[in-house]
Image (cartoon, grey):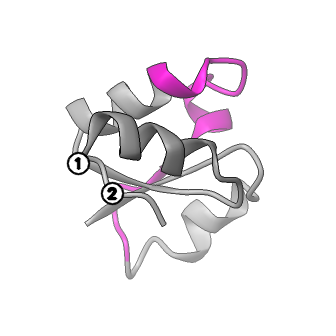
Amino acid sequence: MKLLFDHNLSPRLVNRLADIFPNSNHLFLLGFDQVPDREVWQYARDNNFIIVTKDSDFNEIVILRGFPPKVI
């Protein structure tokens, strides 16, 4: 399971959780910090990520487009 952390969470989570969730990433580290949420959603879907976020924007996209990706 790979996690993709949204910009509203610390990029340090990638390293701190690497032993539990290897191959996870953060939008900032990918250079996606200014990318629209729909493009992030598509990237997560194409690359088998679960999106981890604090805001409801991705939940709304999932309601409209369905799974995957999952959103936490």
Q: For the residues labelled 1 and 2, say whether their Cβ atoms are less than 8 Å apart.
A: yes
* Residue bearing the label numbered 2: 70
Residue located 38% across and 45% down the image: 62
Q: Is residue 57 above or below residue 33?
A: below
* Residue bearing the label numbered 1: 67
Q: Nearer the viewer, residue 59 or 42?
A: 59
The span picked out in magenta is 21-39
Q: Position of residue 34 (x, y in %)?
A: 72, 19
Query: Which of the 4 image quarters holds residue 7?
Result: top right
Q: Position of residue 21 (x, y in %)?
A: 37, 72
| Residue type, label 2 | Lys
Direction from residue 52 to residue 65 in the image, left or right: left
Query: Which of the 4 image quarters holds residue 47?
Result: top left
Direction from residue 62 to residue 48 in the image, left or right: left
Q: Nearer the viewer, residue 14 or 7?
A: 7
How many numbered badges does the structure rendering display? 2
Residue located 50% across and 51% down the image: 59
